Each structure stands twice: as C-alpha cells, then as structure tokens.
Image (spheres, grey):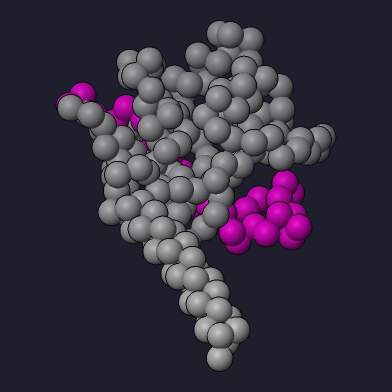
Amino acid sequence: MNPRPSLARPEDAAAIRSLQDEARAWLQARGSDQWSTIRHTDPASPRSLEAGIDRGEVWVWRDRSGIVATATLDDGADPELWTADDTPDDALYLHRMIVSRAAAGNHLGATIIDWAAHRAADLGRHWVRLDAWRSSTGLHAYYLRQGFQHVRTVDLPHRGSGALFQRRAYYPAGTRLDTFMKTAFIVGISLTALGYIALLVAFSVSDWT
C-alpha cells in the first residue's frame, strides 16, 4: 500500500509530534541542531500544530501501520525571510516535512515534494518554497537534487533557519491537467502559425491585385 496524502485530523496531533521527536533525535545523533527547539508548542498559538490542523494546512501520509509522514503546506510566507520582491503570494510554502525512519528509503520525501508542486499549480501558484536550517548542508544538497533552486540565505541571530529554496509548480506528467496544458500550448502554436500563413496569403493576394 503506497502512502497517500490526507488532511490531518485533530486526533493525529500526537502521532505527528512523535514523528517530530523521532526526526529531532535522528538529527541530533548525527550532530545536527536542527529542530533542537520547536517553536509555537502552545496549542493556543496560531502557529501551533493544532492551529495548522484546524486551518487545513497539515497533511499526513498513511500506510497500514499508521502515519508515516507529515508536511505542512500553506500560503503564509515568513515575513522575516521572504520579502515583497519575492512576490510571496505567488507560492505555497512547505514546512516540517518529516518521513518516519521506518518509511525511509522509499523516496516518499520526493513524492511529497512532487505532490506539493502539483498542489501549488492546481491553486494557481507558480512556486513551492521552503526554508531550511542554515547549517544543514546535506539537506540543502537534497533539495537541490529534488529540483529546488537556492534563492539566498538569510542570517538572523535569533533564527537557525534561513536557507531559502524554491521550485517551480507543475502538473505531473500524464494527468488530465498536464495533458490539457500541453494541448493548449500546441493549439496556441498552431493558431499562431495559421495566423502567419493567413497574413502571408493576404499579402500575396494583394500583390497580384
């Protein structure tokens, strides 16, 4: 059974926090301080996990064993990192993507990123963006392999995160929307070509009259 995305429910919060704890311990064992502190742990905070679930921004991937991955996808550009020059409303923002160690090695992370790019395109956005811990160079390399571009790194003394990445939104190959967009592109080119041919014929006729 391939894990498929679904919106997280309030009762999923404990399982998602367990994934966060597992990821934090795994990172610390490898010398990374990423997620050494989790911000907005107060359930009453508008930035908390529970608030994100209520707003429909938190997603989970399940298999027969339960929740094996989670990610938050929203339109809330962090104003400390993304500026007006970035056209922040033209993107969706991917946060807190975690794949359980039991599901690691199955390219589920890449699947989630592709899903985010598809969803962004479906909502009319042109980019999927994320910010990563500045010191996590291995993670930076992973995002680059997944088609992201490094935009810049913002160094704020009170934030560990600040490496900014973005990737084009797109429709997966073979979907109806992908086929529609390709067909529309081909039809557009064909109509343009016919227009040029009609102009040439018109000019040719005028030369003979």
> Quarter-wise, where is residue 126 in the image?
bottom right
Residue in the picture at 52% in, 21% down: 24
Point 52% across, 29% down: residue:
146
Front-most of residues 125 and 139 = 125
Q: Quadrant of residue 56?
A: bottom left
Q: Magenta includes 88?
A: yes
Q: Name, please, the residue furthest toward the bottom.
A: 209
Q: In the rendered image of this protein, does residue 158 appear above or below residue 64?
A: below
Q: Position of residue 140 (x, y in %)?
A: 63, 25
Q: Nearer the viewer, residue 182 or 34?
A: 182
Where is residue 2 shown, x and y percent of the image?
23, 29
Image-based side of 156 in relation to 71, left or right: right
Can residue 159 be seen from the camera position used here?
Answer: no
Q: Quadrant of residue 177?
A: bottom left
Q: Which residues are magenta?
A: 64-92
**Where residue 100 sits in the image (x, y, percent)?**
38, 22
Q: Would residue 11 be seen by someone viewing this image from the given angle?
A: yes
The quarter of the image holding the C terminus is: bottom right
In the image: residue 185, left or right of residue 60: right
